Amino acid sequence: MPSLVDFAYYGGLLLAGPFLLYKVARKRGRRHLAGLPERLGECERRAGQRPCIWIHGVSVGEIRAARTLVEAIERDLPEFEIVLSTTTSTGQEVAKRDYPGKRVIYFPIDFSWSVAKVFRAVRPDVVVLVELEIWPNFLQEAHRRRIPVALVNGRISSKSFRGYRLVRGWLFDPIGKIGQFFVQTQRYAERFAHLGIPQRQIHVTGSVKYDQLQAPEETDPAAIRADLGVREDDLVLMGGSTHPSEEAALLKAYLALRDEFPRLRLVLVPRHTERTNEVAALVRRELPLARRTERKAAGTSEPLAEGEVLLVDTVGELGRLYSCADLVFVGGSLIPHGGQNMLEPVMYGKPTLFGPHWDNFKEPVERLLAAEGAREVKDSGELLSASRELLRDPGAARAMGERGREAMIAARGATERTMQVMADFIRRRTAQRRQRRHARV
């Protein structure tokens, strides 16, 4: 039977229908159709009778953050099969590459009927949500089936907190269907408590993202530079996970710095690969451009030409590419997006810059700024001045990078703290479910 939430969704679809059709009709919008049958419940039934843990991460960042958690589950709960889901197509690509042998599915669209079909196909014993994504029908279906739900690496922004306070206690209470909250900071714990979550269900364990960061010794920066076409004595300014307008700010800074630093190279890695043609056109108005995909297809590792900007238009490479940079700017932060993951370049000991919009990474940014292990720039002007300052003083740049890395290393251990509590929670709740099934038989 349709839920009240379904009727709200149907109404929203009617109102937003023309816009959605326009968005899908555009080339960029076709990614929204990826995996549509599976999103609507046409999901292949899981084979076998092993107990199952369903882990969901919205996109690339969340699914990568789950890596150490997956490894810990395989070690501590080997009897459980793991199924992973993502919402985005890029998340699917990364999950299938990073978790070979694991089943990866699209998260269902939150209609009660599509959610129920996927639950019947996956047959999970436990659901683990990475960070916080609330879908009322999904959580209601888990609750109806008495499937325990745990939130790991949990966080709740001030904006989301205000929103949940407004709607909680109305016709539905989805957040109350989550059984255990493993959160990153005491601030987030207090927010969940203010939403009515009992204190015994909230555990401050830190961020698992610290645990899954690669250490510098696990890469070969010289080999990566050679593969990119960057010479040994070049300086690399890398813009990672950039959004619209941020590439223009980096390009402007690069043009202003070239005369003083003739060996400086600019490497741009847009957050969304579907924007690469747009970014390429922007760069070509000022400078020659090389595309990563074209260089790989040609099998060339020839050095980049004078003034040539490298555009990385591939998926999943950014983490290791940071290791060859001399200075990094992390995007999604000069615009009110909330920031992208700045922990990877920091763990490589790279001097890292980001804009003032970092709400998505509030705890690590506060930790980094307190340690003077990264720098915030307010706008494109400060991006240029901070870049010039750090390029002029490599010793200060290295010291900043090392301070940041040390601050991140000190924050590790969230995965183990989470598993100490969650393994017992999973075993206990799974045993209870089996007892109920046997009692019905």
Image: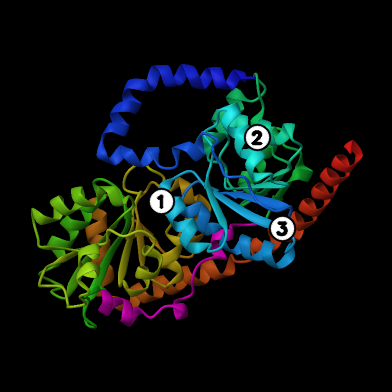
Residue pointed to by mark 3: 80
361 sits to left or right of 432: left
**Is there CB contact under 8 Å for labels 1 and 2?**
no
**Is 312 above or below relative to 435?**
below
The amino acid sitting under disc 2 is Leu
Kindly tell me whether residue 373 is visible in this rendering: no
In the rendered structure, find residue 90 and report the number of the disc placed on it. 1
Secondary element at image label 2: helix
Q: CA distance from mark 3 to mark 2?
A: 21 Å
Q: Nearer the viewer, residue 271 or 189?
A: 271
Quadrant in which the N terminus is drawn: top right
Is 43 contained in the magenta span?
no
Q: Nearer the viewer, residue 353 or 312?
A: 312
144 sits to left or right of 262: right
The magenta region covers 205-227
Residue pointed to by mark 2: 139
**Is 361 above or below relative to 110?**
below
Q: Residue at x 37, y 21 (%)?
A: 17
Secondary element at image label 1: helix
Q: CA distance from mark 1 to mark 2?
A: 24 Å
Quadrant in which the C terminus is drawn: top right
The amino acid sitting under disc 1 is Thr
Q: Nearer the viewer, residue 201 or 230?
A: 230
